[in-house]
Image (cartoon, grey):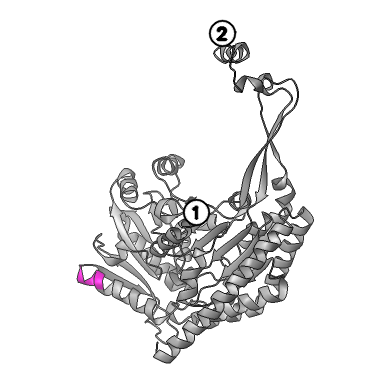
Amino acid sequence: MTFIEREQQEGSDAAAIARLRDIFDLQKRAFLDNPAPSLAQRLELLGALANMMLVNRQKIQEAIAADFSSHPRQFADLVECLGVAGRAQYVAEHLAGWMQAQERNADAALYGSGKAMVVAQPKGVVGNMAPWNFPFDIGIGPAVEMLAAGNRVIIKPSDLTPACSELTLEMIRSTFDPAQVAAVAGGLELAKFFPTLNWDHLMYTGSTEVGRSIAVAAAQNLVPVTLELGGKCPALIAADGLSARNVEQIIGCKTIKNGQMCVTVDYVLVPHAQRDQFVSLVREHMHTHLPDYSKRPDTTGIINQRHLQRLQDYLADAVTKGATLVQLGGDPDDYGRRMPLTLVLDVSDDMLLMQHEIFGPILPIKTYGEIAEAVNYINAGERPLGIYVFTETPAIAEQVLAHTVSGGVCINSAALHAAMPCLPFGGVGKSGSGRHHGHEGFLEFSNLRSVFYRGENDLVAAMFAPYGELADAVIARALGQA
């Protein structure tokens, strides 16, 4: 970046920060004026959001293609557009039930006719720091549960996807009152400032390293955070799980966004004796279904030159440390930043691609003896966002489920848990904290308020001084001595 470009960026960020402050204050005041929006109001917002995604389908496709250099139109439709609209529809269908107060059991012997319940109350103003890889699915998608919970929302798109960021601002500006939903775009200074505000809740999706800094910044105001941080998601193939059908799942998942997906298969664990067969099945799949992979219009480009170089450095480092590369799908397309799928054999844990989330079309293959060995290997690393088990034996699937911890699990599939609006999505440990999607997402962005209505014929006076016969009687009854 030149000096002039830096000055322009800093000036732009200063304006974006000022705008963010104004919108934040506006939404804070608006929330105080209406802290409990009705079901009808929330449904209207969800309908507007779904319609916004549908009427902007073509613009969404074009913006993503512009930022990635190449991106399949159908996938933009399936996930970035229809996926968000469908998520809003699912939540709208269930919202009335979710908003109902949940009555809890109050011991009638102590509390008489008193009533205890939990009420899901809006938190207030919620921020969402979106990633570049799914600019609409994760940029706008979580607003579904945020709005369903009755909140006001401010979205910060990624500066690595300028076309998508500009479209996000345009769509939201033309659909919502800024006192309800707004978006603010900018560069590094805005990104640093965003988590320092006194949010009622903050969501961030991205790398573990940046997520840590976001959490530290938010902690200064004791802001609760939802962190979706990714990690190294393994595909564990049991001895009876290697098949063309399952390889299709693994490679299909890996080639989504050309590997630039937090829940993609990061590496494969396969029995020693089946490694070559796995490679053969992958080779056959690529030849049959994805010939000239690196030149295809439905192959997504790597987001920018820096990330492309990072991936090439991973491969160079692996070769230096003894790996064997199997390149499938043609030669690299530097103009479109499209890489072929590369299998990495003879992998060692000191390689960069085993120490970092890959986020690209590189698939390391590690071998193991017994299932317990593979499970131990997974457990030796950080807890992943997803684990994908391929087996025809239910007991093996249950063994992996029982002895591992992860954000989600798929059996004989990969990453589909992240696409389902009925399932909570998120990580654990360094792969993240908190959940969005579905009912759990509604609860994530709600204040679960405990409410007690005192009734008649209770014994609560036993709690107060002076303590005497009533307190002794309550204690004796609790101990079964009455």
Give the residue furthest to the top: 482
Point out the tag, 2 or 1, that comes first from the N-terminus: 1
Residue linked to disc 2? 481
Residue type at mark 2?
A: Gln
Mark 1 residue element: loop
Q: Which amino acid, mark 1? A: Leu
Closer to the camera in the image, 21 or 361: 21
Whole-percent x, y for residue 143 in the image: 63, 62
For the question of whether residue 468 can be seen, the reply is yes
Taken as a whole, is the magenta stretch helix, strand or loop?
A: helix
Residue shown at 52%/55% (left/top)? 223
**Residue 179 position by quadrant:** bottom right
Dot 1: few (<14), some (14–19), or many (≥20) neighbours within 10 Å?
Answer: some
Q: Nearer the viewer, residue 362 or 149?
A: 149
User: What quarter of the picture does the N terminus occupy?
Assistant: bottom left
Is residue 274 toward the left or the right of residue 171 in the image? Answer: left
Question: Residue 411 appears at what percent x and percent y?
Answer: 48, 50
Residue 239 in the image: state x and y as whole percent. Answer: 36, 49
Confirm whether residue 83 shows in the render. no
Magenta stretch bounds: 317-322
In the image, 334: left or right of 353? Answer: right
Whether the magenta-drawn stretch holds residue 218 is answered as: no
Q: Which residue is mark 1?
A: 222
Residue at 31 percent across and 46 percent down: it is 376
Q: Are marks 2 and 1 in contact (CB under 8 Å)?
A: no
In the rendered image, which quarter is residue 346 located in? bottom left
**Circle 2 sits in a helix, a strand or a loop, which is it?**
loop
- CA distance for labels 2 and 1: 45 Å
| Eye-nearest disc, 2 or 1 | 1
Residue 100 is left or right of residue 139, and the answer is right
